[in-house]
Amino acid sequence: MLKQGLSVKLGQSLSMTPQLQQAIRLLQLSSIELQQEIQENIDINPLLERVEDSLYETDNNGQSDEIDTLQEENSVIPEELNMDTNWDEIYNNDWKNSTNSSESTASDLIDVIHSIPVTLRSHLQEQIDLSQLSPIDKEIATTIISYINPNGFLTESTQHIFNSLQQKLLIEEDEVDVILQYIQHLDPVGIGARSLSETLLLQLEHYYNDHILIIPAKKLLQKYLDLIQKRDYIKLRKALKLTMEQFEELMILIQSLNPRPGDVFNHSTTDYITPDVYVQKMKGLWVVSLNQETLPELQINNYYANMLPSLSNKTDKDYLKNNIQQARWFIKSVENRNSTVLNVANAIVERQSAFLQYGEEAMKPMILKDLAEQLNLHESTISRVTTQKYMHTPRGIYEFKYFFSSHVRTNTGGACSATAIQAMIKKFITTEASNKPLSDSKLMNLLEKQGINVARRTVAKYREAMNIPSSHERKMFA
């Protein structure tokens, strides 16, 4: 039987206050996202404003009256201006033409900026609309186009497309096949294919039908495409019975084909990186500074804040108090974020000064825990601060996370970063003989001479991470 009663219990618990949650969230925002967050807070909180927004605000008895007086005086225009020249003596009649031309140019520019990019589907549909196909064939073609994905491949079978059209059109299944073949020869060629082999064959027949290697090229695409995917070029050359010169020419021919013909219509916008900090060398020392352009100075709106003592309505007074407190918390959170970003950037520059001076080969190993211990912060905080934050250095713009890498022990008992090892591998490969490229085993031996002991598979992993082909492939396409 349960017995009811009262008891007192002491304990500690950690609660996430709204202010703490806000501070943590601001830490992980990029500079652009921070700008958006600041603007949103300014829009909803009348007590929060940018410093520059208040430069033109004055007291009621201050300069505003003088400004109004000046505006009134300037608004009065005399009927006759005291001029001793005529308009036509200064400006010729071409000014109108130049004005109209500039307006036209500006209008054209606006049209270009706001123009809707052409999609693959609209491009194909326009060709169908301008064709001599019958209305029924155009209906079939439009339906087929709706099943073509952005890469240019047909996602449904002709049987499925026929079944979807059978209810409203009196057609045969072979009519769908005929229209599909018609679409496959529209621009871009190879569109509407059902496999990689089919789209490459369509392009091959269209562009290189008279090529001397057209027969082995077709045979390769029909039977041995898997060998290319496996990069088994020795077996492939034997299967096609080609000399080395013929095989190299064939590979160049195949590489000229587009495996995703619809990609030319996949429009993507360019993302511009705004650095959070700048790193410069001044008087022999690396100096880190915040990018002030991304950090608007915030303050409390004095006009509304000064109204607080004179308010008698409790609702209005509470509203202003709450917004003032929210504004102060937000300003404090932004300041904490900026100081934390600057401290982390300074710590990174301090540890990676050799990289800034000599390049990637001098990159030192560093993990989140290293900075967390140095700055007396939690690793999760370091992770948030280094996400989507960028550093402008004399060597380029890098994300904070770029400077973190694992380490490999050296023969002398020290450590070398993975980034430095990759840079060494890249340097060795850049200077290798084209007719005798370095294998992973030879790269391993070269690194060992530098005092770095890594396994051959580790070298292969680093090489593949940099998208560098194997020695066999580098020799074949040298």
Image (cartoon, rainbow, N blue to C red):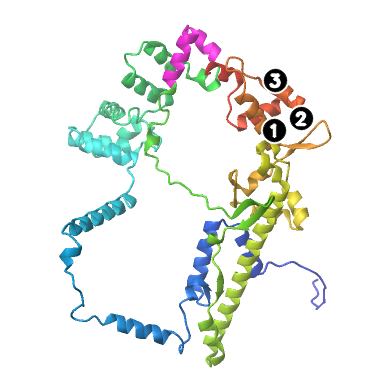
**Nearer to me, 108 or 324:** 108
Q: Which mark is residue 452?
A: 2
Name the spot of residue 64 as percent of width and height, x first: 42, 84
Question: Measured along the vertical axis of the image, is residue 331 above or below residue 449?
Answer: below
Residue topped by disc 1:
421
Name the spot of residue 419 as percent of width and height, x first: 67, 37
Q: Residue furthest front?
A: 84
Helix, strand or loop under label 2: loop
Q: Which residue lies at the image location 22% right of the left edge and 55% below the top edge?
A: 98
Residue topped by disc 3:
442
Helix, strand or loop under label 3: helix
**Nearer to me, 478 or 192:** 478
Q: Amino acid at mark 2?
A: Ile
Q: Which mark is residue 211?
A: none
Q: Which residue lies at the image location 46% right of the left edge and 17% below the top edge?
A: 251
Query: Does label 1 or label 2 sit earlier along the sequence?
Result: 1
Q: CA distance from mark 3 to mark 1?
A: 14 Å
Q: Is residue 97 magenta?
A: no
Q: Are marks 1 and 2 in contact (CB under 8 Å)?
A: yes
Q: Which residue lies at the image location 34% right of the left edge and 18% below the top edge?
A: 208
Q: Is residue 251 magenta?
A: yes
In this rendering, would 227 be left or right of 27?
left
In this rendering, would 91 be left or right of 381?
left
- Which quadrant of the structure image shows residue 455? top right
Q: Which residue lies at the image location 67% right of the left edge and 39% below the top edge?
A: 358
Q: Amino acid at mark 1?
A: Ile
Prevailing secondary structure of the magenta residues: helix
Q: Amino acid at mark 3?
A: Lys
Q: Which residues make up the magenta segment?
A: 233-254
**Nearer to me, 216 or 291:** 291
The quarter of the rendered structure image containing the N terminus is bottom right
